[in-house]
Amino acid sequence: MVVYIAGYGRSGSTVLDVLLGSHSQMLSTGELTFLFKDAACNDRSCSCGKTYIECTLWGDILRSTRISANEANNIIRLEESPKLLIRKYLLGKEKRNINKLTYKEINLNLFKKLGGFGFRYIVDSSKTASEASLRPFELSKNCGLSVKVIHLVRNPLKTWMSEIKANNWEIEGMKQHRRFRILRIIPGWFIANIYAAMCKIHLGKDNYMKIRYEDMVSRPNIVLERIGNYIGVNLSTQISMIDGGLPFEVGHNVGGNRVRLKKKIVIKKDS
């Protein structure tokens, strides 16, 4: 089963991903949609510190994918990003079908390999912003995977202020500062959360749960209990770890959030 964290960035998705990944049946993967994009970059590495091809988790998956990381990423972006819909439909029906089948092959191989490590749940915090807006729908409808969506929402003003302070990917040198970036945050927030809310309609109300970032930081115990009941796991150990101020280990996270670069994180209750 895929536990998919949807919504916009800067909303605590990486922290929630790592927290859930501390459960013995759950694997924290970070922004899994960008695995092949990051693997194609020579200067990117897994949060474990190794390059993706050398990583004990990702290396075998990348070697078992029959096309290059760059080609795999191009197909994933084409299928998951609404920005590319026009280009997608200019390719012709035959090419669209081939891309859809290849997308399915890439992801079924990916999740099969991850499941082979003995985990029942794969936590994917790719969210529903920009390039990954359609990912939860594609994983469910195209790939036939069981997807449970956690729609994580943060106050838009607080999100905007957090993004102004620092952009996660720019901190890691992934891209240059874009002009008017701060003006794109609020409309981006609304669009990402609209796509996340649509999961309730297209995937069914039993596969959708909405939580507020503010509740997660002020009442993590209650939020975790709700999540546990929703996906069918006992998160009492994680609740006890938070109460005791114990650290959560960051394993093999993909993506640009700087939190993943820490070896361990401590969840602090806030108001």
Image: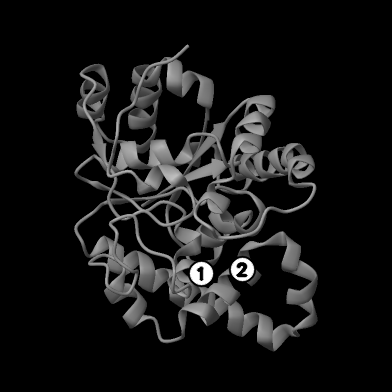
Residue 138 vertical placement versus 248 (above, below): below
Ranked by sequence position, the earlier of labels 1 and 2 is 1
Residue 115 vertical placement versus 108 (above, below): above
What is the image's colouring? one colour
Q: Which residue is rendered at x = 19% and y = 44% of the image?
A: 24
What amino acid does circle 2 point to? Arg
Indicate the secondary structure of the residue bearing disc 2: helix
Indicate the secondary structure of the residue bearing disc 1: helix
View extreme (top): residue: 271
Q: Is mark 1 in CB contact (under 8 Å) with mark 2?
A: yes
Q: Which residue is rendered at x = 80% and y = 47% of the image?
A: 180
Disc 1/disc 2 C-alpha distance (Å): 9 Å
Q: Residue 166: which quarter of the image?
A: top right
Which-is-in-front pick, marks 1 and 2?
1
Q: Position of residue 267 (x, y in %)?
A: 34, 26
Q: Position of residue 79 (x, y in %)?
A: 62, 68
Q: Nearer the viewer, residue 24 or 10?
A: 10
Residue 77 is marked as: 2
Q: Residue 64: which quarter of the image?
A: bottom left
Q: Where is residue 175 in the image (x, y as percent from the top left)?
A: 61, 60
For this view, does 107 lie left or right of residue 132? left
What amino acid does circle 1 point to? Lys
Residue 37 is marked as: 1
Q: Residue 241: which quarter of the image?
A: top left
Mark 2 burial class by Cα count in 10 Å: few <14, some 14-19, many 20+: many
Q: Where is residue 156 in the image (x, y as percent from the top left)?
A: 68, 29
Q: Which residue is rendered at x = 78% and y = 51% of the image?
A: 179
